[in-house]
Image: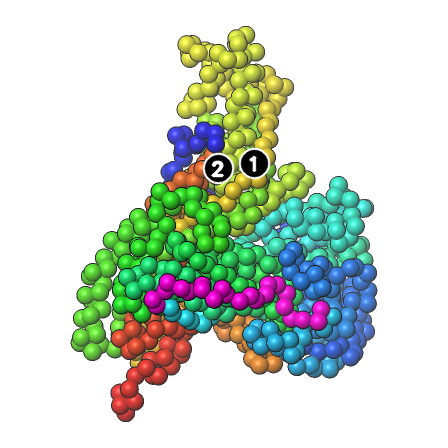
């Protein structure tokens, strides 16, 4: 690995985000706010039943409604269906609009294009649809029986995976074996900005604006769907109000926009409502997990088996969530025997896909609950069991029980720091005092130690750096932020390598006409890949500039020195005679530019320990999060402020899943959580001030030494909170409660565990 970064002027300091001024003053550029003359508005008519045959679809009244420009159904389309994602059942394809049958409530059926949004909504109400209702399958475990098929053409509900028998000796040597069925509840991503898209034709050239995580993959998909020459397609991703893995700009609603724009000869815009977002944007999590963990009575873990049933929803959206759970099945622990099995059946519900962590939080939730159950069974503190089984620092790189190589780690150090910050002894004393005095508000302390994988596919990234004749720098990146502060981080890296002031650096992303290629943002990959590309491009720019400086000095290039602190070039031994970036750019004809393609590279493995302190009201079941302590290790830190912001957001997401958020359906497949009154989205009022700290264990996978941090907070927080609530009720004999830990669910557990005389 080449020289590591980190000795510059800004590196490692809490620099304020350079993006925020525009966003806070209303100057951000979002797709819904683009000023586009003659833009028409698109509204989709959606299925109101979970499963059924379409027996009548009459759009005549809608087509004749005031302001309506076009009405499109499956009969108007001539597209091949979208193929199943890689590794998923290839027979399970998805039409852009269904022709004969519907598979879930919220599935788009008809596109209405009108002069105004209001006119499109009014016309949508006039579409007359009759169904022959069919029996849906909602439970993923029931779907595995194939008694009711979601996709009759496929002949099975299984979209991914399969079962195998464990070796008969798998748990040999285990003195204690614990088993559990764990529910990892279905969540909605709820980005602040929902799906938004715009399509414009200029002759044969197509421009699409998308609110998503990357520009180039959607461009490739549009070219495939429409058979277009890539030179004729431009995708622009401006400011994005959140995504969390869900907004990939490849859904039917977005892919149809170019067709609608071409049919009416005008630009079109689609902006979904919050209800549409909750019922039809890919959901996350949705796993039923069967864990079996065995070991010795003195706390050594020997064998772990995990079987997951992941609800794929009505169409297979992405297979990485099950694969990422597999990668991290044993977590931070050195377990000799590990087995993983995954099954992903279709159901008549909204498709599931990536959501903040995409399989990694699910893996941590499984192993961390099983470790707690094992520790309770052998009567030892769970922290001691963790400590005994952590992968030792000197064992890295470490191949875990699934054959996946972890890069670096100091798991025990992170745990010890978190426990010290929490002051566990004092918390246990307060817990005992409350129980001894008979108080009805009991205390629970829970922890989790996690490892996750960042840039899991090991994909590379594009970066370029250019300096003009006034000394300003332009950074281009193939990564694509949606709230993380990536522009700030990349500008800091370029500044540290070049000496150019932050105020003189502009970062460009998300435009296929300005950036030749890129893999965008996802899987906490942007800094370690996009940042590395920028670092190496800037180093290349320095070397390139030295050659032009040598011409100015009429000296040998090997004698030219770059003074990074002063952002000036001079000949060795004569620093008083120097030239600037602007000077060398003018010498080069007006500008200097170097681009770099970093990778493919190896994934990195962030880790940490989280501690949650909760208060549980035994009379109501209400859970209040009192404290949250997080120690996370994302390798070398470029900007502590950005890292802390990512950890804050991740913890909030994890606490939300643990305590409140769950997408629910009734037995007929009707969604019961269709707005933010029914779906318990977390707010700042439910959260304490987080106590954040870190350890730094650099990786060698990139020149920065950085690992990802976007999903760490979520990965560690869910089991920490769950373990805390279970701990609060341990005196009642409670050993497990499924997520989410709502007041009603906790209250029912308390009632069931309390002798009936206490209720008299």
Q: Residue at x 29, y 67 (%)?
A: 378
Q: Are marks 2 and 1 in contact (CB under 8 Å)?
A: yes
Q: Secondary structure at mark 2?
A: loop
Q: Residue at x 64, y 57 (%)?
A: 87
Give the main secondary structure, helix, strand or loop, of the magenta stretch.
loop
**Mark 1 = which residue?**
598
Extreme residue toward the bottom, this view: 760
Camera sees residue 628? no
For residue 159: magenta?
yes
- Give the magenta-colored segment's residue range: 154-176
What is the C-alpha distance between the residues marked 2 and 1? 9 Å
Q: For residue 404, say whether it is visible.
A: yes
- Where does residue 745 sit, x and y in percent of width and height? 40, 77
SS at circle 1? strand
The residue identified by callout 2 is 702
Q: Is residue 759 above or below residue 447?
A: below
Q: Earlier in the sequence, mark 2 or mark 1?
A: 1
- 455 and 389: which is toward the camera: 389
Say left or right for 204 vs 647: right
Q: Is residue 714 above or below residue 542?
A: below
Q: Residue 215 location in percent, x, y?
A: 63, 47
């Amino acid at each position: 690995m080449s020289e590591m970064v980190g000795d510059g002027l800004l590196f490692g300091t809490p620099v304020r985000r350079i993006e925020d001024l525009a966003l806070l003053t209303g100057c951000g550029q979002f797709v819904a706010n683009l000023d586009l003359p003659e833009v028409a508005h698109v509204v989709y008519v959606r299925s109101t039943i979970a499963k059924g045959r379409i027996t009548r679809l009459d759009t005549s009244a809608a087509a004749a409604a005031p302001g309506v420009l076009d009405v499109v159904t499956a009969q108007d389309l001539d597209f091949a269906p979208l193929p199943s994602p890689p590794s998923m059942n290839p027979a399970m394809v998805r039409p852009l609009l269904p022709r004969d049958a519907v598979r879930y409530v919220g599935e788009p059926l008809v596109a209405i294009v009108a002069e105004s949004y209001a006119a499109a909504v009014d016309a949508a109400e006039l579409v007359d649809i009759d169904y022959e209702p069919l029996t849906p399958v909602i439970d993923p475990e029931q779907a595995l029986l194939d008694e009711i098929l979601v996709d009759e053409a496929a002949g099975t509900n299984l979209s991914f995976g399969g079962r195998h028998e464990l070796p008969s000796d798998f748990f040999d040597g285990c003195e204690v074996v614990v088993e559990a069925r764990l529910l990892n509840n279905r969540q909605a991503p709820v980005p602040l900005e929902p799906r938004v898209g715009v399509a414009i034709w200029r002759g044969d050239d197509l421009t699409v604006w998308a609110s998503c995580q990357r520009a180039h993959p959607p461009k490739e998909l549009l070219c495939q769907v429409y058979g277009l020459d890539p030179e004729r397609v431009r995708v622009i991703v401006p400011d994005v109000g959140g995504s969390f893995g869900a907004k990939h700009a490849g859904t039917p609603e977005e892919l149809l926009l170019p067709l609608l724009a071409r049919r009416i000869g005008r630009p079109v815009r689609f902006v979904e409502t919050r209800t549409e977002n909750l019922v039809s944007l890919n959901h996350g999590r949705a796993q039923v997990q069967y864990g079996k963990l065995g070991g010795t009575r003195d706390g050594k873990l020997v064998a772990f088996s995990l079987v997951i049933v992941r609800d794929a929803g009505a169409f297979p959206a992405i297979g990485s969530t099950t694969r990422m759970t597999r990668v991290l099945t044993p977590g931070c622990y050195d377990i000799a025997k590990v087995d993983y099995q995954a099954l992903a059946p279709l159901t008549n519900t909204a498709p599931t896909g990536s959501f903040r962590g995409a399989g990694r939080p699910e893996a941590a939730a499984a192993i961390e609950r099983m470790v707690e159950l094992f520790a309770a069974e052998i009567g030892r503190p769970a922290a001691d069991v963790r400590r005994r089984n952590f992968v030792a620092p000197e064992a890295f790189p470490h191949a875990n029980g699934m054959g996946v190589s972890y890069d670096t780690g100091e798991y025990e150090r992170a745990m010890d720091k978190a426990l010290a910050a929490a002051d566990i002894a004092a918390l246990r004393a307060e817990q005992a005092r409350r129980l001894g005095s008979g108080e009805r508000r009991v205390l629970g302390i829970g922890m989790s130690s996690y490892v996750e994988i960042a840039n899991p596919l090991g994909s590379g990234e594009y970066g370029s750096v250019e300096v003009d004749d006034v000394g300003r720098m332009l950074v281009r990146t193939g990564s694509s932020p949606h709230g993380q502060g990536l522009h700030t981080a990349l500008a800091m890296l370029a500044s540290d390598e070049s000496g150019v002031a932050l105020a003189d650096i502009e970062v460009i992303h998300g435009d296929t006409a300005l950036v030749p290629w890129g893999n965008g943002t996802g899987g906490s990959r942007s800094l370690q890949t996009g940042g590395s590309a920028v670092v190496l491009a800037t180093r290349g720019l320095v070397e390139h500039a030295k050659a032009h400086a040598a011409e100015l000095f009429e000296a040998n290039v090997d004698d030219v020195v770059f003074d990074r602190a002063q952002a000036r070039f001079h000949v060795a031994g004569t620093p008083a005679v120097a030239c600037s970036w602007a000077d060398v750019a003018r010498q080069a004809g007006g500008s200097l530019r170097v681009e770099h393609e970093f990778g493919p590279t190896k994934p990195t493995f962030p880790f940490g320990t989280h501690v949650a302190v909760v208060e549980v009201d035994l009379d109501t079941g209400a859970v209040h999060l009192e404290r949250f302590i997080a120690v996370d290790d994302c390798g070398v830190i470029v900007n502590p402020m950005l890292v802390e912001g990512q950890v804050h957001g991740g913890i909030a997401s994890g606490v939300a899943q643990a305590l409140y958020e769950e997408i629910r359906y009734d037995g007929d497949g009707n969604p019961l959580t269709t707005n933010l009154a029914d779906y318990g989205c977390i707010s700042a009022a439910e959260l304490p001030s987080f106590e954040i700290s870190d350890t730094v264990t650099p990786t060698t996978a990139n020149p920065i030494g950085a690992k990802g941090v976007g999903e760490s907070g979520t990965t560690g927080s869910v089991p920490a909170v769950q373990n805390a609530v279970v701990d609060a009720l341990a005196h009642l004999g409670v050993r497990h409660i499924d997520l989410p830990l709502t007041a009603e669910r906790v209250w029912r557990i308390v009632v069931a565990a309390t002798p009936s005389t206490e209720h008299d």
